[in-house]
Every structure is written in structure tokens, then in C-alpha cells.
Amino acid sequence: MSGHDDLLAKLRQTLDEQGIDSFHILEDLVPIEEQMEYFRYFDKLRRENKPFDRDEEVSILFSPVESVARKKESLTLLASIPDVSAYRSIETYHSSPLEPELTHWSSMALVSSRIILSSDLSGHQQIYISSGLGGYDKKLRFFSLFTTNNRQNFTDLEKEIVEREFTFQIKKAEVEIEKFEIKDNYFTILLLFSFDKDVKSSLNAAVTECNQYGNFLDTKFLFTNVKILTEKEIGKMLNKKQP
């Protein structure tokens, strides 16, 4: 079992054991480092516990002259209270940020506000599941990279086999394919799935099926929810693995 498989299994077990059916996944793609920066700042303001006026913070948030640093504070403060108006203000700002550099920050503030508001309204424990690739509607997003065995280019037939077998296995597991790209000697798939799906087994099955037609796929592949690799990053990785 890989690290990600183990993590997903433990997460499923924790949710089941504690009877938690209400959790929140960040839908936007926010780097883990920025997520951690937000939560450190959020905790800092919570410890300081200085009083603030909601309407004043909303005015600051939408002001054309306030600094980015001050708006970071406003977003975080507004996200710290169970207040529908505060939530709507963050939501409005995030839909079209006046400062593009606060897009990720406002995304984090929005999910934080949603958690606090939901907890207050329902009286039930809410949890946040962190992922660099985010997710959607209780589903996690994962990026996978597959390569040819000896980094040779695919033939047209092999490309057809890859697309057919992987699409079949993934859809059979009721997993959503958000993006499927086949290049010269590798292909990538962006997947969206719920916790109860054993996606890794489906991907392994697809590799096995493809390799019945000439053993052309490497059985080792990348499966991560941290980031989407660029073509340049993939190129460097493949060069390192050249036989």
C-alpha cells in the first residue's frame, strides 16, 4: 500500500469511527504551503483575540486604497466569526478579487468561514480536509502520471489502447476524469473521486490490461494530490529515469 492509499484508508476509518459525515474540501487549487500560512495566521489572530467591527472590516475589504496586508487581516477576521453577512462578504470578494494576489487567501477564508458557520448552525463537528489539488462536492482531486517502459514513444495503436482501457477501468469505478492527456511517451490523468473508491486498484488494472498488448507501460506511476506537474517538471523526471 502506498502512502496515499494508506492516508485515504485512515481517513475513511476516522470518518466512520467518529460518525463524521460533514467535512469540507477546498475546491480551489491552493498550494499546501499557502494553506499552512493561512492557518498559522488564523491561529495568530485568534490568540490575540482583539475586538473588531464586522462592518468596518467589510468596508476595508472592498476599499480600493487599503493594502493587501490589511485585507488579508480583514478576510481572516471575517472568516473567524459565525456570521452569514461576513460569509457573504468573503464570497463576494472571492468571486472577483480586487487584488489577484489574494485569490488563494480569499479561497481559504471562504472555506474557513463555511466551516465555522456550519458548525454554529448545526451544532455538529465539522472538519477540513487539506489537499494541494483541492476537490469538489466531497470528492478529492488526484493527479496521475504514467510513462512507457523504456521512455520510447507510443505508437498510434498504443495510444488507442491506453485511452480505451483507462477510460473503461476508471469509469467502471465511478471515478470522474477531469482531464486526460496523452503525450509522446507519457500520459496524465486528473481524477476526482470520493473516499470510498479504491482508485489505485483501478489504475493498476488498467496498466495490466494495456500491458497484455506488448508490455509497453511502466508499472510504476505517480499518484498524488499535492500538485499538477508541468511539462517541464515531467520532462526532468523522465530524463532522470532514462535507462
Image (tube, grey):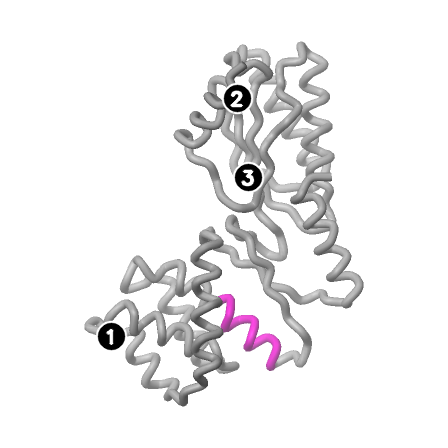
**Lower sequence index among marks 1 and 2:** 1
Residue at image mark 3: 143
**Where does residue 101 sit, x and y in percent of width and height?**
31, 58
Amino acid tagged 2: Lys
Q: Residues within 10 Å of mark 3 (few under 14, many from 20)?
A: many
Judged left or right of residue 231, residue 214 is: right
Res 38 → quadrant? bottom left
Residue occupying image coordinates x 63% and y 57% = 138
**Where does residue 89 sit, x and y in percent of width and height?**
39, 74
Figure quadrant of the C terminus: top right
Q: Residues within 10 Å of mark 2 (few under 14, many from 20)?
A: few
Question: In the rendered structure, which segment of residues is drawn in magenta?
Answer: 111-120
- Nearer-the-camera pick, 58 or 168: 58
* Disc number placed over residue 63 in the picture, else none: 1
Element type at marker 2? Answer: loop
Figure quadrant of the N terminus: top right
236 to 143, vertically: above or below: above
Residue occupying image coordinates x 68% and y 24% = 207
Amino acid tagged 1: Ser
Residue occupying image coordinates x 67% and y 67% = 22
Residue occupying image coordinates x 62% and y 21% = 218
**Lower sequence index among marks 3 and 1:** 1
179 to 130, vertically: above or below: above
The answer to whether residue 94 is magenta is: no
Res 233 → quadrant? top left
